[in-house]
Amino acid sequence: MIERYYSCFTAVCDYCGKRLPGSESFKGTLRDMRDAGWESRKNGDDWKCVCNDCLFTEKGYNEDMTRRSGLLEDD
């Protein structure tokens, strides 16, 4: 989700709660998300923000960026 505090917009991961630094515009926040490797996903009528750590976990990577199975191959 993207939260708004007065004139500052902040991206918050909908899965783990990680936050990006605030931006002065909504478009700036979307750009910051893209630059940080985050994704926006449409879920029904709502949009979900997913941070890069949650994306790695979702794709089967460990914290050290290796596959959980020990293989480094792509799917």
Image (cartoon, grey):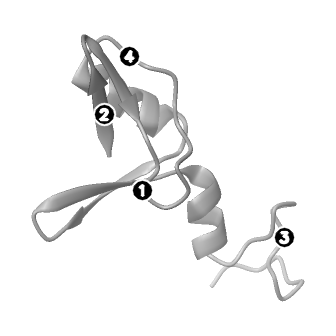
Q: Residue at x 44, y 28 (%)?
A: 32
- Residue corresponding to mark 2: 3
Tell me the kind of residue under disc 3. Thr
Q: Residue at x 89, y 83 (%)?
A: 70
- Residue corresponding to mark 3: 66
**Residue 14 occupies quadrant:** bottom left
Is the C-beta separation of discs 1 and 4 under 8 Å? no
**Residue 41 occupies quadrant:** bottom left
Is the C-beta separation of discs 1 and 3 under 8 Å? no
Give percent across and percent down for residue 10: 39, 28
Binning the other alpha carbons within 10 Å of mark 2 as few (below 14), some (14 to 19) or many (20 upward) gives some
Judge from the rendering whether residue 73 lies leftward or rightward of residue 27; answer left or right: right
Label 1, label 3: how far apart the Cα atoms are: 24 Å
Q: Nearer the viewer, residue 7 or 26?
A: 7
Give percent across and percent down for residue 38: 48, 47
- Among all residues in the image, which is located at the extreme front? 5
Q: Earlier in the sequence, mark 1 or mark 3?
A: 1
- Residue 60's disc is none
Judge from the rendering whether residue 9 lies leftward or rightward of residue 13; answer left or right: left
Q: Residue at x 44, y 42 (%)?
A: 12
Label 4, label 3: how far apart the Cα atoms are: 32 Å
Q: Earlier in the sequence, mark 4 or mark 3?
A: 4
Give the foreground label among 4 and 3.
Answer: 4
Label 2, label 4: how far apart the Cα atoms are: 11 Å
**Residue 48 occupies quadrant:** bottom left
Give percent across and percent down for residue 54: 58, 61
